[in-house]
Image (tube, rainbow, N blue to C red):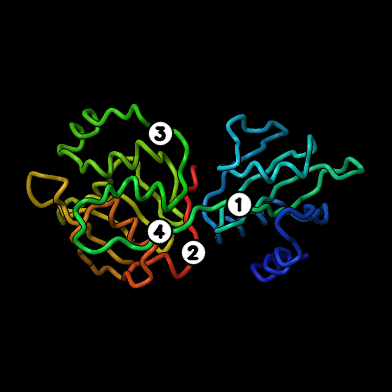
Amino acid sequence: MELTHATLDDLLVRLAPGGAPLYLPEELDPHDLTRLLDDRYGTPRTLVLDGFTDPTADESKGSALLAFFEDRAVTIRAWAYGDRWVGTGTARDVAGAERPVLVVAHREVPEQPAPAPEGNVDVDWLERLRGITGWTQPDQRPDVDWAEVQARLGTALPSDYKRMVETFGRGSFDGYLDLNQEPWTAFREDALLMWAGTEHEDLYCWRVDGDDPDRWPVVVRSCDGEDVAFDCGAAEFVCRILVDPHHRFTMAHYFDTHWFMSH
C-alpha cells in the first residue's frame, strides 16, 4: 500500500466515529501514516507510548479513541479535528500481532459564538477564547515567571498574551496556529515581537509602539513578506480569525469548530 493523502482520504472514508478501528497491513510503516496526519492536522497528542497510557488522558484529550483497544494499544497518537478525534499508531490485533491502526471517535464541541462587534471594549477576550475552543482544563502554566522573561527581553508584555500562555500552555489553535511560550525577537530591528505563527508561515507579531504593551497593535508578517496591522490585542485577534469568515486571515473557512491542541 502506497501512503498518500489520497490513500489517507480513502481510509478515513471507511471509518465512522465510534466504529471499530481499521487494522492495516503489518508492512505499512506507522510513522508514514503519522506524518501524513501531522501534515494535515498539526502536532498530535500522544495517548499511549510503548503500551503505557498517558494518565492525564481524558475526553478533552482524545481518550474516546482508547475505548476500542482495551489493553492492546501499543502507541496511539491523537488529533482533534472539528467534531472528530482521529488516532493512529499500533495495536495488537485479536491474534496478538502488532499492526498499524487508524481509528476515529466522536468529539464533543461547544456551540460556536458569533464574532463580537467591532470596537466592543467590554469583552474579556481570553474568556471568549475559552468558550470558542471549549477549553475546560486547569491553567497549564500558571507559574510562569514573567518578571524574569520580561527582564530578559527588556520589555513588559501584553497582559492578554500572558494569560493565554498561562491558560493554554504549549500547543496550537486548531492544530494550526502555534502559540509561542515567549515572544521571539528575530524582527526586533523592525520593532516587532513575534507571539505566534502558522503552518503557512504567517507570523503574528506586535508592533512595539509606546510604553503600554496592552495598546500594542497586532501585525501579521505574511508569508509573502507583507506587514498587515490590526488595531487589537493578541487574544482578540485569535478570537476573530477563528470565527469571523470575513477576516483577512480567517481560519473559519477551514474549520467549523475550534480547539486547542496541547503539545
Q: Is residue 130 above or below residue 40?
A: above
Q: Which element carries disc 4, helix, strand or loop?
A: loop
Q: Are marks 2 and 3 in contact (CB under 8 Å)?
A: no
Quickly name the residue at label 4: 113
Q: Residues within 10 Å of mark 1 (few under 14, many from 20)?
A: many
The label on residue 107 is 1
Q: Are marks 2 and 4 in contact (CB under 8 Å)?
A: no
Q: Residue at x 78, y 37 (%)?
A: 70
Which of pointers 1 and 4 indicates the residue nearer the eye? 4
Quickly name the residue at label 2: 255
Earlier residue among tags 2 and 4: 4
Q: Are marks 2 and 1 in contact (CB under 8 Å)?
A: no
The label on residue 139 is 3
Which of pointers 2 and 4 indicates the residue nearer the eye? 4
Give the camera-side residue of 152 and 44: 44
Q: Residue at x 21, y 53 (%)?
A: 206
Image quarter where the N terminus lies is bottom right
Q: Which element carries disc 1, helix, strand or loop?
A: loop
Q: Is residue 24 above or below residue 69?
A: below
Q: Residues within 10 Å of mark 4 (few under 14, many from 20)?
A: few
Q: Position of residue 156 (x, y in %)?
A: 16, 38
Q: CA distance from mark 1 to mark 3?
A: 21 Å
Q: CA distance from mark 2 to mark 4?
A: 14 Å
Q: Residue at x 45, y 45 (%)?
A: 171
Earlier residue among tags 2 and 3: 3
